[in-house]
Image (cartoon, rainbow, N blue to C red):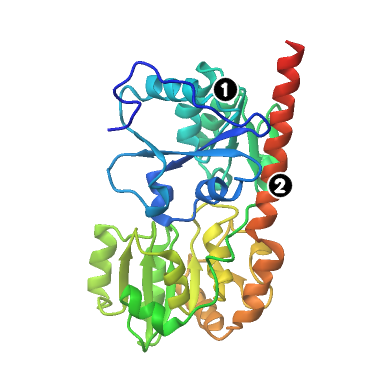
């Protein structure tokens, strides 16, 4: 039971006057792949912001890092009212969402509660979105007028001209995702010690092609699926038909990603539609060469060990995977991420942006 579930209102929660109150929204899917910038921001912005984490879930299980988060039932028919009560109590300066679905629901409740700033970070999936999804996003933008944070110009270019846009590349926690003992990591998550292992954590539409590619490769090449990379019933049937049961390892959505990345030899990211996948950055921060499919931009791949590859044709993918398996250079791969995509750089920019919005809020109140 959430403390807001049984009340008709909530007392004002005291906050600091010299820094913004920011509510970060995290959903169940974010926790499963455990790479959400919401958790990184809630932990890393503390010096600049009074951050609160709001967990929207359809289940009772939580990631340990979210134990102190406020939790609301995602499918609750009373969700809008409870969100308004929560925002009236917290009186945040900023409500920050990370998924279009949460922007529509949480953003609307924030507007009704009088929250001055709704900020939405586009993860990039809209870059490969269907027209209907882009139309829905455009409608939400026109209704709520949020400030949109996008990772690159590619995403910015497809948004409505009237949208408020800030280009702010994402970052990865290089203290968490780091070089590690591969043998130890494999023991911890239950992977075999001997084979070469390709890892995949993307909700890829090309899993069939990837499975056929694994089938065509040497028998000491295995595949580990974790995070949101979960085979469907049809794909499990394909695994059986190709006699790949002993070479495909489904670790599940709650596998610790830092251990999974340390355990594999190569990371593969399918055409998930994400134009700046943090999973690719996390794998490389662990020193693993990465192979990715469009629309992943080449600039997120280490120029020495990473490569873009198509997935429509299994033999071509086999060739790319074999080359990538031979391109290991952990130190160079990790250094590429630490020098260009370190979370600390993103936190500084987010902190500056939120402070700027906070100062604008104070100025508007004085003028009023």
Residue 251 percent across, percent down from the top left:
32, 67
Residue 146 shows in this picture = yes
Residue ID at (61%, 46%):
45
User: Residue 84's quadrant in the figure?
Assistant: top left
Note whether 129 is above or below 261 in the view shown: above
**Percent x, y for residue 7?**
32, 20
Q: Residues within 10 Å of mark 1 (few under 14, many from 20)?
A: many
Position of the C terminus, as image quadrant, is: top right
Helix, strand or loop at label 1? It is loop
Mark 2 neighbour density, 10 Å: few (under 14) some (14–19) many (20 or more): some
The quarter of the rendered structure image containing the N terminus is top left
Is 255 displayed left or right of 136 in the figure? left
Q: Which residue reaches farthest top?
A: 368
x then y, percent, for residue 310? 54, 66
Of the two numbered discs 2 and 1 on the same chain, state the one appearing first in sequence. 1
Image point 50% across, 49% down: which residue?
A: 39
Position of 112 with respect to 77 (left or right) is right
Cβ–Cβ below 8 Å for labels 2 and 1?
Answer: no
x, y percent for residue 163: 68, 29
Pick the residue in front: 70 or 135. Answer: 70
Q: Which residue is mark 2?
A: 349
- Above or below, 321 relative to 170: below
**Residue with the mark numbered 1:** 115
The reply to whether residue 309 is visible in this rendering is no
Q: Looking at the image, which is closer to me, 166 or 59? A: 59
């Amino acid at each position: 039971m959430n403390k807001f579930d049984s009340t008709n209102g909530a007392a004002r929660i005291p906050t600091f006057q010299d820094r913004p109150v920011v509510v970060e929204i995290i959903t169940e899917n974010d926790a499963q792949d455990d790479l959400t910038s919401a958790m990184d921001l809630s932990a890393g912005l503390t010096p600049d912001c009074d951050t609160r984490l709001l967990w929207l879930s359809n289940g009772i299980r939580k990631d340990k890092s979210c134990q102190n988060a406020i939790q609301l039932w995602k499918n609750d028919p009373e969700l809008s009212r409870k969100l308004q009560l929560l925002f009236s109590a917290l009186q945040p300066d900023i409500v920050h969402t990370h998924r279009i679905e949460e922007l529509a629901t949480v953003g609307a409740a924030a507007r009704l509660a009088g929250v001055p700033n709704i900020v939405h970070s586009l993860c990039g999936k809209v870059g490969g979105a269907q027209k209907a999804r882009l139309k829905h996003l455009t409608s939400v933008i026109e209704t709520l007028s949020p400030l949109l944070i996008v990772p690159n110009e590619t995403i910015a270019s497809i948004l409505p001209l009237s949208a408020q846009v800030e280009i702010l590349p994402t970052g990865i926690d290089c203290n968490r995702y780091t070089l590690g003992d591969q043998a130890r990591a494999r023991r911890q998550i239950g992977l075999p010690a001997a084979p070469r292992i390709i890892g995949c954590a993307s909700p890829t539409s090309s899993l069939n092609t990837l499975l056929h590619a694994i089938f065509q490769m040497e028998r000491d090449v295995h595949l580990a699926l974790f995070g949101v990379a979960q085979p469907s019933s049809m794909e499990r049937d394909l695994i059986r038909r190709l006699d790949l049961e002993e070479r495909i390892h489904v670790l599940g959505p709650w596998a610790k990603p830092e251990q999974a990345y340390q355990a594999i030899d190569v990371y593969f990211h399918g055409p998930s539609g994400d134009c700046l996948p943090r999973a690719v950055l996390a794998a490389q921060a662990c020193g693993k060469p990465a192979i990715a499919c469009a629309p992943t931009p080449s600039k997120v791949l280490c120029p020495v060990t990473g490569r873009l590859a198509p997935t429509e044709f299994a033999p071509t993918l086999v060739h790319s995977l074999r080359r990538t398996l031979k391109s290991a250079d952990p130190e160079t791969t990790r250094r590429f991420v630490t020098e260009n995509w370190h979370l600390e750089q993103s936190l500084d920019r987010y902190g500056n942006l939120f402070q700027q919005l906070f100062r604008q809020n104070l100025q508007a109140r004085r003028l009023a």
